[in-house]
């Protein structure tokens, strides 16, 4: 079996190094090049012929969704796996519409990451559990959300996802990361990422400030 050739595109060196370290023991996987932004990723692809592009959804000089769209229009056989810290419905839907073959949260385990990689490389699709629910709601059941961004902003100035509001509610109930992860059947790492994103979005430093702001804007 020939090696699965991969190009990594992420603006964080530590993330790229982490993925390479994770793949070190995989004898049939080879990282042939890297890119630190969207434009660089497209330039790298002009000089390489990988089987799979692993791309971060948020990068400077063209984000991951823009890169995937161009890649799918230019390189018909190239597979694309989108990595993200966000399980936002908006991001997932945009990635799929751009042609992504998979969408995986950065909090995924090594086992799930490898499963996604091999599934996509062999011609399949891979979306983590939480993402699959979004796909079902939007593409299978035909319940695409048509609410405009302006309407969303009026209702929620922070544009929190349903999952973020769910986790926000549990945090305010003084649930710790492990308890939240068990209740929602997600990893502790994914819970930590959500907590970090919530604190950042609401511009707060502690749980009291988070609770006060959530009450002020009727987020729960």
Image: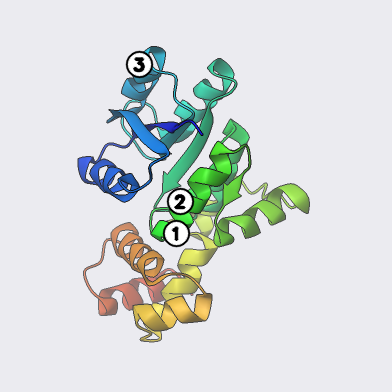
Residue 215 in percent (x, y) is at 41, 76
Q: CA distance from mark 2 to mark 3?
A: 26 Å
> Is label 2 or label 3 in front?
2
**Quadrant of the rendered structure where residue 132 is?**
bottom right
Query: In terms of depth relative to the viewer, which is nearer, 122 or 211?
Result: 122
- Residue tagged by mark 1? 111
Say whether marks 1 and 2 touch (CB < 8 Å). Answer: yes
Q: CA distance from mark 1 to mark 2?
A: 5 Å
On the question of residue 91 being in view, the answer is no
**Tag 2, which secondary structure?**
helix
Name the residue: 36% across, 77% down: 177
Name the residue: 45% across, 51% down: 114
Q: Residues within 10 Å of mark 3 (few under 14, many from 20)?
A: few
- Residue tagged by mark 3? 43
Query: In terms of depth relative to the viewer, which is nearer, 103 or 193?
Result: 103
Q: Is residue 98 left or right of residue 145?
A: left
- Residue 95 in the image: above or below residue 77: below
- Residue tagged by mark 2? 114
């Amino acid at each position: 079996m020939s090696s699965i050739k991969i190009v990594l595109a992420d603006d964080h060196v530590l993330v790229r190094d982490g993925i390479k370290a994770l793949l070190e023991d995989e004898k049939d996987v080879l990282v042939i090049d890297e890119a630190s932004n969207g434009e660089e990723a497209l330039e790298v692809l002009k000089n390489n012929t990988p089987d799979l592009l692993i791309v971060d959804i948020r990068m400077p000089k063209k984000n991951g969704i823009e890169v995937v769209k161009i890649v799918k229009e230019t390189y018909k056989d190239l597979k694309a796996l989108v990595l993200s810290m966000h399980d936002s419905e908006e991001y997932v839907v945009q990635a799929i519409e751009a042609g992504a073959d998979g969408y995986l949260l950065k909090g995924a385990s090594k086992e799930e990451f490898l499963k996604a990689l091999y599934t996509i490389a062999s011609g399949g699709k891979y979306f983590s559990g939480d993402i699959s629910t979004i796909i079902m709601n939007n593409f299978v059941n035909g319940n695409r959300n048509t609410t405009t961004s302006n309407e969303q902003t009026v209702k929620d100035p922070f544009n929190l996802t349903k999952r973020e509001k769910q986790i926000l509610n549990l945090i305010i109930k003084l649930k710790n990361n492990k308890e939240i992860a068990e209740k929602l059947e997600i990893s502790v790492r994914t819970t930590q990422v959500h907590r970090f994103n919530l604190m950042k979005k609401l511009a707060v430093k502690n749980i009291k400030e988070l609770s006060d702001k959530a009450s002020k804007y009727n987020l729960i």
